[in-house]
Amino acid sequence: MTNTANKTSPIKRAAVLLLACVLAPALLSAQKEHTRNIMCPVDGTMFAVPVTENITVTGLSRDLEKLGDIGYHYSTMICSCPTCRYSGYHEDFGGPFTRKAKEDITRIIAPYKNQPPGNAVKCEIAAKLNIYFGDSNDRIANIYRVGSYLLRGDRNQESKRKDLQRQCIVYLKKAVEAREYSLDSDYITAHYLIGEFSRRTGGFSQAIQYFDMVLKSPLADPTLLKYAAEQKKAAQSRDDSNGI
């Protein structure tokens, strides 16, 4: 969908944020929001989207969701055309697409046409389109991860939240297997997320396996080691709590 070779990966950003929250949380204390107009590359619809440039972060949940006064940060990461429902990151609205690509995109989106619009749906569509365009597994995993964050606390969509987490596991594993990360610390973060999403979806044996990878790594930062130890105990107790 877009060339991400020179972009910082979502896992890399999570690792940096993890360190920043430990060493200098005050650096993550500014927030600025505005809107910008973008055009759908499929049907030409122009629409305004909110953009969050900076956020106030006070910590991380156990699935590494940013906590604090973050405004619309996660909900504005993925945009969706109000007409055809083409969805993706802001940079995915560049285009233009070939006629064949537009036909394929329309076919991919079609199953979602009768579903009410919402954060989970737009993330699912964006992930499917990123898969179609051959984007990185890490990028696809992050879309599913963001979708799961957006459903936190929605009891009516707990099953959907877990579905998104399972898909995140699939693509994090593919990213690891494809050696998509440049730093060892990125792999540690990916292993932790695989472990935590496995625990949340009832895959306790796999969760323990991946938490052990983190705990045995001499390169894991102290906060991630702490989280891995805590969440391993939860997995051993067969605790699939999804609210922490």
Image (spheres, helix red, strand yellow):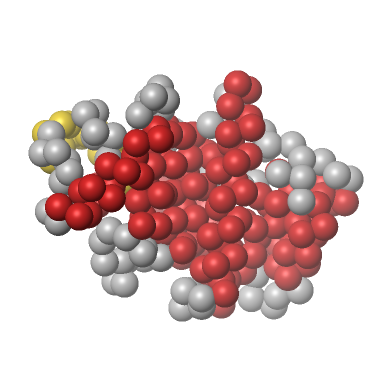
* Number of numbered discs: 0
Residue at 28%, 47% (x, y): give it. 105
Task: Classify the position of the N terminus by image quarter.
Answer: bottom left
Task: In the rendered view, tell whether residue 206 sits above or below residue 188.
Answer: above
Q: Residue at x 51, y 47 (%)?
A: 145
- In the rendered image, residue 172, in percent from the top left (x then y), is placed at 55, 62
Residue at 46 percent of width and 34 percent of height: 120
| Whole-percent x, y for residue 50 in the image | 25, 33
The answer to whether residue 33 is seen in the rendering is no
Residue 33 position in % (x across, y down): 25, 35
Residue situated furthest right in the rendering = 237
Question: Which of 84 and 137 lies nearest the eye of the viewer?
Answer: 84
Residue drawn at point x = 20 percent, y = 48 percent: 102
From the top left corner, tell me how far across and down residue 56 is, in percent: 41, 40
Image quarter for residue 205?
Answer: bottom right
Compared across the picture, whether 98 is left or right of 228 comes to left
Q: Quadrant of the C terminus?
A: top right
Quadrant hosting residue 59: top right
The residue lying toward the viewer, choosing from 133 and 18, is 133
230 and 149: which one is in front? 149
Query: In which image quadrant can residue 36 be found?
Result: top left
Q: Is residue 121 visible?
A: yes
Instruction: Pick the residue in front: 205 or 45.
Output: 45
In the picture, measured across the screen, residue 77 lies left or right of residue 59, that is left
Q: In the image, is residue 69 above or below residue 212?
A: above
